């Protein structure tokens, strides 16, 4: 299984400002990258940054860009990290895209915060579930994989 993670911004990716006397959060590298580095996933993935915006600033043009990224991807399992304020508007546009499984997720607190829900939400979005008779354990990695 291969998953494409598409970064669009939102609270999940927010970080403290890098400038002195900065007061507004910045959106930098994808929170997914940091989360997946910690868990050693048993699947392949790519991370693509489509946008780095607060979801309140995402325009219809931006949504069309997200649509095109998903449509043009050879990967059919896609998880989009997105701000929670306009997630439904983006989902509505993406609902026109057939033949792919697309999950949109975000967080109420930035992944950089110790009490963030980001890691849980990403894990839930991946949602890898195995039937007992179709799984085995890879003793080299400790991961469970499909037979």
Image (cartoon, grey):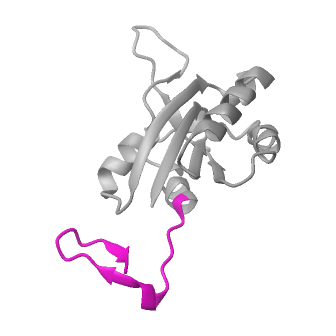
Asked if 27 appears above or below 31 in the picture, the reply is above
Identify the residue at horizontal 54%, vertical 45% (top origin).
74
Region in magenta: 126-147
- 82 vs 144: above or below: above
User: On the rendered image, what quadrant is the C terminus found in?
Assistant: bottom left
Q: Residue furthest top?
A: 20
In the displayed structure, would residue 48 be above or below residue 59? below
Q: Is residue 119 above or below residue 5?
A: below
Residue toward you, 107 or 59? 59
Magenta highlight on residue 138: yes
List the single residue furthest toward the left: 140
Residue at image location 58% in from the left, 52% down from the top? 76
Residue 32 is covered by the magenta coloring: no
- Residue at figure coordinates x 45%, y 34% from the top left: 30
Quadrant of residue 136 within the rendered picture = bottom left
| Quadrant in which the N terminus appears | bottom left
- List x then y, in percent, for residue 138: 24, 75
Residue 88 or residue 118, whichever sits in front: 88
Q: Residue furthest bottom?
A: 133
Q: Does the image show residue 97?
A: yes
Across and down, in percent, residue 140 comes to: 17, 71
Q: Nearer the viewer, residue 102 or 20?
A: 102
What residue is shown at x 45% (from left), y 18% (from top)? Answer: 17
The reply, left or right, for residue 52 in relation to residue 36 is right
Q: Position of residue 143 (x, y in %)?
A: 30, 71
Q: Position of residue 48 (x, y in %)?
A: 48, 34
- Number of callouts in the render? 0
Residue 82 in view of the camera: no
Residue 72 vs residue 93: left or right?
A: left
Near-viewer residue (18 or 145): 145
């Amino acid at each position: 299984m291969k998953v494409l993670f598409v970064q669009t911004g939102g609270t999940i990716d927010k970080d403290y400002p890098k400038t002195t006397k900065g007061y507004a959060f910045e959106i930098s590298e994808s929170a997914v990258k940091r989360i997946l580095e910690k868990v050693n996933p048993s699947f392949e993935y790519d991370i693509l940054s489509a946008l780095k915006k607060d979801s309140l600033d995402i325009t219809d043009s931006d949504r069309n860009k997200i649509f095109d990224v998903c449509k043009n991807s050879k990967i059919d399992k896609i998880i989009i990290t997105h701000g929670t304020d306009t997630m439904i508007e983006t989902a509505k546009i993406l609902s026109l895209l057939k033949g792919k499984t697309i999950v949109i997720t975000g967080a109420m607190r930035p992944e950089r915060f110790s009490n963030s829900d980001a890691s849980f939400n990403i894990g839930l979005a991946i949602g890898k579930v195995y039937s007992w008779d179709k799984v085995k354990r890879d003793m080299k990695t400790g991961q469970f994989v499909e037979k």
